[in-house]
Image (cartoon, grey):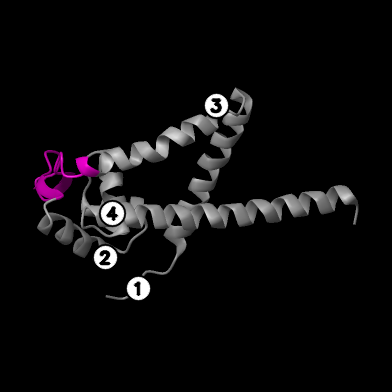
Amino acid sequence: MSSVGADREDLIAQLDLAGRVQSTVAVMFHTALAELSGLSATEQKALDLIERFGPLTAGELAERSGLAPASVTGLLSRLERKGFARRVPNPDDRRSVLVEMVRGRLDAIGPHFLELLRPLHQLYDTFTDDELRAVLRYLTAASQIQQEATTRLPKPDH
């Protein structure tokens, strides 16, 4: 094998490891952040989906999260019981409801996100615009691949 091929294989192995490390620290950060509000990481990320995409039906949340519909039903009941989400009539379909966030309930974690974003923005300043575009292209594609892998996982029986 040529050294060029070996160098690329080594680089890909380093990328795989860096991705694993990034995934682990992201899960741990979001778990700790969610716990500050009395939420699980899954509950906090479900709220993130609702915040990013607006009110969603339970089916849409299941599709976007990759969770089984039965899991989403329980998740939404917990979020509603904890006062973070509410079900409202769907103006486009009287037979269904939308789940929306209760505004202000996550305000307490905002400063903790800023503590993460400040050094990340400082890190961005060390990259050229072309490098940032490459990072953005990678993150966008990798997120899509992971989302697709999530939807292919077998759903647990409940």
The residue drawn where x is 20% and y is 40% is: 107
Q: CA distance from mark 2 to mark 3?
A: 41 Å
Which image quarter: residue 56? top left
Q: Amino acid at mark 3?
A: Asp
* Mark 1, other Cα within 10 Å: few <14 / some 14–19 / many ≥20: few
Image quarter hosting the N terminus: bottom right
* Mark 4, other Cα within 10 Å: few <14 / some 14–19 / many ≥20: some
Image quarter hosting the C terminus: bottom left
Q: Earlier in the sequence, mark 1 or mark 2?
A: 2
Q: Amino acid at mark 2?
A: Ser
**Disc 4 designates what residue?**
34
**Residue 71 marker:** 2
**Disc 1 designates what residue?**
156
Q: CA distance from mark 3 to mark 4?
A: 29 Å
The residue drawn where x is 77% and y is 54% is: 9
User: The residue tagged with tag 4: helix, strand or loop?
Assistant: helix
Q: Which residues are magenta?
A: 84-108
Horizontal side of residue 47 vs 128, given as left or right: left
Estimate the x, y position of residue 88 in percent, counting from the top left.
Answer: 9, 45
Horizontal side of residue 1 vs 80, given as left or right: right
| Along the viewing direction, whichever of 98 and 40 lies nearer the viewer | 40
Q: CA distance from mark 2 to mark 4?
A: 18 Å
User: The residue tagged with tag 3: helix, strand or loop?
Assistant: loop
Estimate the x, y position of residue 77 in percent, counting from the top left.
Answer: 15, 60
